[in-house]
Image (tube, rainbow, N blue to C red):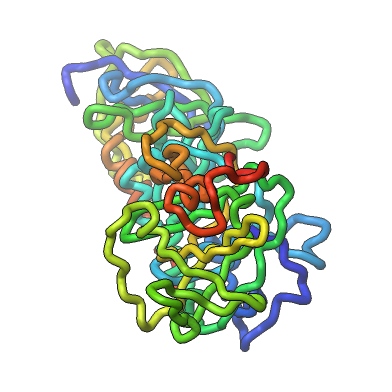
Amino acid sequence: MVRAHIEDIASVYDAQVYRYREILLPLVFLRDTLEIGGSIDDGDTKSALHIAILSAEGVTFGLVVDEILASQEIVVKPLADSLKQAAAFSGATILSDGRVALILDVPGLARHSGVGASTIGSHTAATRAPIEPLRDPAQTLVLFRIRDNWRVAIPLSGVARLEELAPSSVERVGAQGVVQYRGGLMPLLPLLGLLEPGAPDPARAETPLQVVVHESGNARVGLVVDEILELVEDEVAVNEVRGRPGIIGSSVIRGRATDLLDVRALLAHAGVPGFAAAAPEGGTRP
Amino acid sequence: MSEDRLFCTFRLDSHLFGIEIAEVQEVLRAQEITRVPLAAPAVRGVINLRGRIIPAVDLRRCFEMGAFPPDRTPAHIVIRGAGSASASLLVDDIGDVVDTTSAAYAVIPPTLRGRARDLLLGVYKLQGEVLLVLAIGTVLRAAFAESPLPLGRS
């Protein structure tokens, strides 16, 4: 979720886009899509827009809303069949004060708003800008996907940067894949291989590598994931502690079961050089 | 008409309407309604009925009566569905339960035209007043089917 300054909004013919991390993000104005009419009733709309950056069916776009309130874990309730035909909502939920909140059908919105096939993922831009620091890093998690549907989250404090690396930039030192990074060599480790030693490293010859850079002292490592999903700013309740090294436990984030990683412990357990078990203070517990 | 002669009555504008008691699950005072954009025009929104989310149908809109007076919050008549509540009807005021056993029943007069004709089953002549009996199935079908706007149709 971002607050976009109006000078970062550009028009491409009659479509508006937002300059976001070196790419142009198509914007969908929710008021128009839902035919609510009127204009955003906000004193500072002339200078800024509230944009939720959404991803659905391989498409990333910015949804312009009046105001962003909070992120919250919810229980999804079905909508009556008689309301489904509108196709704008996938369900509803009941808030703590008893009011009903509607859940937007994001893939439906993306399809019907004509947000094209251009995606962040298909961009070959070499490097993403670092994440903007958020107010409370202890509660901010970076959400990833590894393998088909394994969701993992890392506290933002354990993430130095998120990078998208061209496959051609990967070199080898012995058996270890490395990449030249900020004047040094950074080893690239598939996160899946760390969590499940022996898991085959899927060949990704074509697509850019999604890499989470973790730093500790002078040591630096790039964890390769399948997809960087989003930043979640939320209170996370770990409901089940797994007896696996590097995994603090699992939780429900954004309605999906998600494993919470302790990167430091994971690297120490895997014996990655420079990340010894007796790591200094400043760990990654949420 | 069925054997059941008990009707839950309510007012819409100046008219007295009735729904067979067997169709009614419960009657509620003002409820917070969450608007549902792009829904059918007669669907005012959804309400939270003890954790279930059900649509709220604007009966004034169904009968083309114009909006509810701004100073009044509509009451709700929750209609029984198959196994659970299916919808809530927004009405001006809830009336008494009326026993029509001794009242004369009449079909809709042929001179009644317009939408109301399809939405009523018949009328009972009460003392000094006429009770219009709602064809609840037809009302709900019409309310939900009425050209909701498919997203992105333009």
Question: Quarter-wise, where is residue A38 in the image?
Answer: bottom right
Dividing the picture into quadrants, the one containing residue B103 is: top left
Seen at 39% across and 25% down, the residue is B130
Left or right relative to B36: residue A127: right
Residue lying at 33% horizontally and 41% vertically, measured from the top left: B139
Residue B138 visible in this rendered orientation of the protein: yes
- Seen at 45% across and 45% down, the residue is A246
Frontmost residue, A172 versus B73: A172
Observer-nearest residue: A213 or A98?
A: A213
For residue B77, above or below residue A17: above
- Say which residue appears at 61% left-offset and 44% top-offset: A283
Q: Is residue A214 left or right of residue B50?
A: right
Q: Position of residue A209 (x, y in %)?
A: 46, 74
Q: Specify the quadrant that holds the N terminus of chain B.
A: top left
Say whether residue A107 is left or right of residue A68: left
Where is residue A102? Give x, y as percent.
49, 45
The tally of labels here is 0
Q: Position of residue A184 (x, y in %)?
A: 62, 75
On screen, residue B63 above or below A106: above
Please tell me which residue lies in front, B145 or A239: A239
